[in-house]
Amino acid sequence: MSAHGDYDLGHTVAGWTGTAIGVLGSAVLGAGVVTASAAVLWAGAAVVVLAALVCWVLHLAGWGKATGLRPKAAQGWRVRDTGARGGHPDCLGCRMAGRGRSRAAAAAGPAPASRPARV
């Protein structure tokens, strides 16, 4: 049993990796503030942006998680999501990558066919 009981808190490889890189970027930003160095500030900002990109790429590769609870067998942080290729419903990152649709759009069905232009 985990320290959090039966709750699926979404601990994933993508989340942990993005957080670790983001903490490093924040430390570099802090060093830039203390030293009043614009170059160090820009380097720290670049590392924070890198953290977001790495987290997003890992999520799309299946090392993230969909919104909501996962089955008990899939709650481990090192469990890969095999359904990530199709995109997660209501996932902004998946929609930005052109994967999946929102639940509202999926419930509404396919988009209506456009009418042919009259000549």
Image: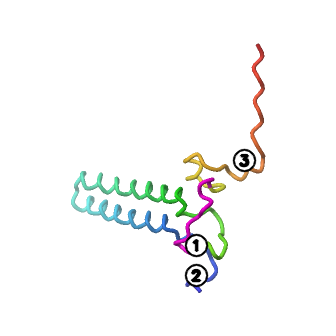
Q: Is residue 83 magenta?
A: yes
Is 19 contained in the magenta span? no
Q: How many discs appear?
A: 3
Q: Secondary structure at mark 1?
A: loop
Of the 4 image quadrants, the one containing the C terminus is top right
* Mark 3 residue element: helix
Q: Which residue is more in the foreground, 76 or 53?
A: 76
Bounds of the magenta span? 75-87
- x then y, percent, for residue 22: 39, 62
How crowded is the residue under tag 3: few (<14 C-alpha within 10 Å), some, or many (20+)? few
Q: Residue at x 46, y 68 (%)?
A: 16
Instruction: Provide the secondary structure element on which disc 2 rests.
Output: loop
Amino acid of disc 1: Leu
To which residue does mark 1 refer?
A: 9
Q: Quadrant of residue 76?
A: bottom right
| Position in image of residue 48 (x %, y %) | 38, 57
Dividing the picture into quarters, in which one does residue 81 lie?
bottom right
Magenta part, dominant SS: loop
Separation of marks 3 and 1 at Cα, in angstroms = 27 Å
Residue 55 as seen in the image, left or right of residue 82? left
Q: Are discs 2 and 3 less than 8 Å apart at CB?
A: no
**Horizontal and vertical percent position of residue 2:** 57, 84
Q: CA distance from mark 2 to mark 3?
A: 34 Å
Rendering coords of residue 117 (x, y %): 75, 20
Residue marked by disc 2? 4
Relative placement, left or right, of 3 versus 27 is right
> Which residue is drawn at the image coordinates 78% and 26% (left, top)?
115
Left or right: 18, with 90 as reference point: left
Q: Tag 3: residue type? A: Ala
Residue at the spot 59% in from the left edge and 58% down from the top edge: 84
114 is higher (above) or lower (below) than 42 = above
Q: State the residue position of label 3.
A: 105
